Amino acid sequence: MDALVNDVFNISSENDFNNISLDIFRYQAVNNPVYSRWIRELGVDYQRVEEINEIPFLPISVFRNHKVLSGGSDAEKVFISSGTGGMKRSSHYVIDLSIYERSFITCFRNFYGNISDYVILALLPSYLEREGSSLVYMSNRLVELSGSEMSGFFLDDYQSLKRRIILLDNEGKKVILLGVSFALLDLAEHSYINLENHIVMETGGMKGRREEITREELHSILKERFSLDSVHSEYGMTELLSQAYSKGGGLFNAPAWMKILIRDPHDPFSFYGHGRTGGVNIIDLANIYSCSFIETSDLGISHPDGSFEIVGRFDNSDIRGCNLLI
């Protein structure tokens, strides 16, 4: 499998992506008991699947009640979703953490360059207060790789955070302030900070701490209070090992090993072309040892250049910690 993992992170064309997707699908169709059962119940013969739009996608809710694993090995780490209001949380059993690290480190470098060029300030209070957050794991590793003793996590000591940012700005350091939505709003309301020379990146999530607002409203407030032209966003979830990033305007781009497909809300086995709102299906080839084909509860729009937008969620679906409601 090592060769296939290397292939995932060396995808250079649409043809590469399609071929590797089919290879991983056939592997998971045989070696993932939960996914294999799902495929059988749908009446799909995996050996006859020849196009990626023929691949069945596993509903993301399955991660709440089943151990979704391919290959039968023990998990090195279990990531647990945040959840709200007592809902049952999803568990993602990760057999090989090095694949997760390779995914988010490579993706970050592709979008932002060398991690050591930045001081990473992580404002993730709700995530730090619980065990098993994949976002905290990723952020902690980025803090380490920044190589700066000024990088680190903050809870609700906004005055110390403000002083840290002013000091770094005076020293000409580049800062990425990575934060959950409600904490960034709390910071914005606490004090004005000039961050025009830096990057503010929201990861979504009100966590029941504040009323849900649109991403556009959130970004408008943050831009005004932090003197920003744009606010960046990270789109990820516990059940995935890859993330997409937006550098502003709500337009996300995914790494070469991740793809968004938009399904017909009334027929989950049919897909829309670009420019229409529908359900978001995600292919994450880094999920080689769990399931790479996930049907989410998000609503989105894809564009011909490969970018996409997240515009809301299906009615009556659970609020997820890493996404905003519209």
Image (cartoon, rainbow, N blue to C red):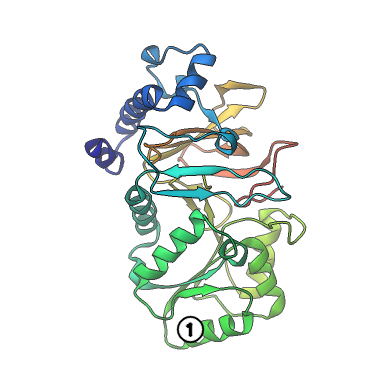
Q: Is residue 196 above or below residue 312?
A: below
Residue 246 at least partly seen: no
Which of the two residues, 26 or 95, is positioned nearer the viewer here? Answer: 95
231 displayed left or right of 292:
right
Disc 1: which residue: 169
Q: Quadrant of residue 127?
A: bottom right
Which of the two residues, 99 or 275, is positioned nearer the viewer here? Answer: 99
Q: Quadrant of the N terminus?
A: top left
Q: Callout 1: helix, strand or loop?
A: helix
Name the residue: 66% across, 74% down.
187
Residue 310 at least partly seen: yes
Q: Is residue 114 above or below residue 103?
A: below
What percent of the width, then of the height, locates residue 68? 47, 34
What percent of the width, then of the height, locates residue 270? 56, 20
What percent of the width, then of the height, locates residue 201? 54, 63
Q: Extreme front residue here?
A: 74
Q: Extreme left residue here?
A: 3
Under mark 1, the amino acid is Asp
Name the residue: 34% across, 74% down.
147
Q: Is residue 290 above or below residue 245?
A: above
